[in-house]
Structures are given as structure tokens and as C-alpha cells.
Image: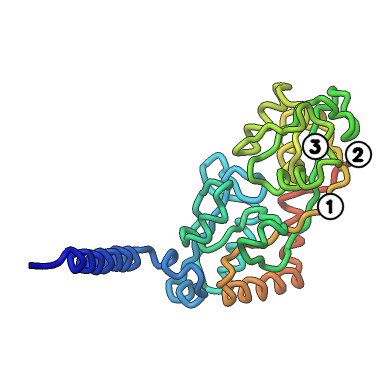
């Protein structure tokens, strides 16, 4: 007859090996990207000749869909040029932008390339390519609003994209704009196009947004003269490619191509095409 103590030991051993088996099975069926999220994936990408890049496909003019549903934009053109030079095809994958770092680090995508701004907070989770474009945050208002400087937003309602670098800057430096707001909170939107709809309907008094997006959006409106852009004390942002920290080979390959395209004028020409001329901006 087996003693009670021995039964406990046997059951514990069985439970242990069952647990190990479950974990091992999970590893075997995991996606390659998920299983090796901390390993350099550059050799896999080169072998497959395909890279999956995550984006918010409403982020005009960096990456968005035209009337025919085709992905177009500054970052689309730049990324596809970089990887065409490397003999690799880009597979674009629309993601929830508020979950972008999670999508990257679980291996669902290989890179973030969509007006992705370099910030200290993001640096804790991902690695960056070299900076390839610089932009400013601007407050977009209706000219009839009576808002001429950031302090005129006192008691007003501001719109912002949830999970964006603009949201980070707004909260990190509340003295610049946030402290003026009604309730000191901005209204969050999952995409900027919805925020502009509310601005036009005067449900918002202002919209804090990347200047490149604002310039493109306003230029394509029926009455672009109806808007004013206000620039305050926010520092210019640097756009980079977001990568897993282990992807050193991929990082080096992208940086080499970005250097080349900066030097030969390709990036400068893209900026002129997608962002247009510099507008008259009111400084706070």
C-alpha cells in the first residue's frame, strides 16, 4: 500500500511534467516571430525576403489609404524604397496604434514605420533607427475661434490621438498647454480624421497634431483658409523606425539605407512631395 506521503510526491512529479509538456507544446506551435522576439530576426527576414510593418492606415500623410483603398504616403514610399534596395518586399499590417509596441515585441510585426516619434518612454520598450524626418506639434484651430495663442485655450476643449507622441508631450509638459484646458484633460481619438470632423463641427476648440499631418489635411480641404496653425513651446519631434531591441542586423541595414537616401536627396524630394510648402505659422 502506497503511503500518503509517497502519493503526494508522485502526484507532484506528474503535475510538474504535465506543466513542462504544456509549456513545450506552446513553444512549438508559437509563431516564429513570437518564439524569437528577443533574437535578431534579420537573417529570417532576408531568407523570406519579406518584412511585416505595422501602421495606423489613417495617418495622413505618413501612411493612409487613398480613394481606391491603396496604401500611400511619405513613410510608405520611404520604407518601400529602403527595402526594395535590400531586395525585400514590405507587407503592411494595420494595427491598433495604442498597442503598437506590444504588437512589435510579440512578433506580430517586425517594425513600426508610420510617423513613429522617438521618445524616452518608447526607448524603454523598443530600439530606434536613425532619425529620418523632423516635425513640430501644432495646435489647429478655426480662424473664427478667437484662439491666437496656447493661453487662449483656457477653459477650452482639446482633441488628441490616443497613444500618440502628442499625447505624451502634452502630459509630460503640462505647463505648455494642458494646464489651460477645461478639466485639464484632452478628448482622445483613435484616429485624427475623427478629431478633425469634431473640430469642423466645433465640438472641439483645438486639435494638437503633428504639423505634417495638419498641413496635408488642411491643403486638401474645400476651405483651407478657414484654419490657423499655432506653434507653442513643444520641442520638434524626430521620426524613426521602431524595432525590437534584439534586431541589431535589421537596425543596421535600415540605417545604411536611410543614410544613402538622405545623401542622394531622395528623402528631401519626398518631403516636398508629401508635405508641401511651409505655411505661415503663428508662434505662441
- 143 vs 162, nearest the viewer: 162
Secondary element at tag 3: helix
Q: Give the residue at x 80% y 37%.
A: 178
Instruction: Say which quadrant the N terminus sits in.
Output: bottom left
Q: Earlier in the sequence, mark 2 or mark 1?
A: 1
Task: Classify residue 227 by image quadrant.
Answer: top right
Q: Position of residue 97 (x, y in %)?
A: 57, 47
Q: Position of residue 50 (x, y in %)?
A: 47, 67
Pointers 2 and 1 in contact (C-beta within 8 Å): no
Which is closer to the viewer, label 2 or label 1? Answer: 1
Left or right placement of residue 198 versus residue 27 in this view: right
- Identify the residue under disc 2: 282
Q: Which mark is residue 149?
A: none
- Identify the residue under disc 1: 235
- Identify the residue under disc 3: 178
Q: Position of residue 243 (x, y in %)?
A: 59, 65
Amino acid at each position: 500500500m502506497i503511503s500518503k506521503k509517497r502519493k503526494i510526491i508522485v502526484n507532484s512529479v506528474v503535475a510538474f511534467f504535465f506543466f513542462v509538456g504544456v509549456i513545450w507544446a506552446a513553444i512549438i506551435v508559437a509563431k516564429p516571430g513570437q518564439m524569437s522576439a528577443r533574437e535578431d530576426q534579420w537573417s529570417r527576414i532576408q531568407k523570406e525576403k519579406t518584412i511585416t510593418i505595422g501602421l495606423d492606415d489613417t495617418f495622413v500623410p505618413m501612411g493612409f489609404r487613398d480613394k481606391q483603398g491603396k496604401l500611400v504616403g511619405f513613410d510608405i514610399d520611404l520604407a518601400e524604397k529602403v527595402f526594395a534596395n535590400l531586395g525585400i518586399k514590405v507587407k503592411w499590417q494595420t494595427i491598433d496604434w495604442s498597442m503598437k509596441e506590444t504588437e512589435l515585441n510579440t512578433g506580430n510585426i517586425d517594425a513600426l514605420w508610420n510617423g513613429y516619434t522617438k521618445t524616452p518612454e518608447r526607448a524603454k520598450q523598443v530600439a530606434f533607427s536613425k532619425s529620418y524626418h523632423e516635425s513640430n506639434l501644432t495646435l489647429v484651430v478655426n480662424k473664427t475661434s478667437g484662439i491666437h495663442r496656447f493661453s487662449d485655450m483656457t477653459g477650452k476643449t482639446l482633441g488628441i490621438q490616443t497613444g500618440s507622441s502628442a499625447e505624451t508631450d502634452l502630459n509630460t509638459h503640462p505647463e505648455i498647454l494642458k494646464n489651460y484646458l477645461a478639466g485639464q484633460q484632452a478628448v482622445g481619438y483613435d484616429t485624427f480624421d475623427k478629431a478633425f470632423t469634431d473640430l469642423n463641427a466645433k465640438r472641439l476648440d483645438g486639435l494638437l497634431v503633428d504639423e505634417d499631418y495638419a498641413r496635408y489635411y488642411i491643403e486638401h480641404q474645400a476651405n483651407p483658409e478657414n484654419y490657423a496653425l499655432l506653434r507653442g513651446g513643444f520641442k520638434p519631434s524626430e521620426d524613426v523606425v521602431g524595432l525590437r531591441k534584439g534586431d541589431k542586423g535589421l537596425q543596421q541595414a535600415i540605417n545604411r539605407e536611410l543614410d544613402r537616401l538622405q545623401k542622394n536627396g531622395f528623402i528631401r524630394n519626398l518631403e516636398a512631395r508629401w508635405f508641401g510648402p511651409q505655411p505661415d505659422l503663428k508662434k505662441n
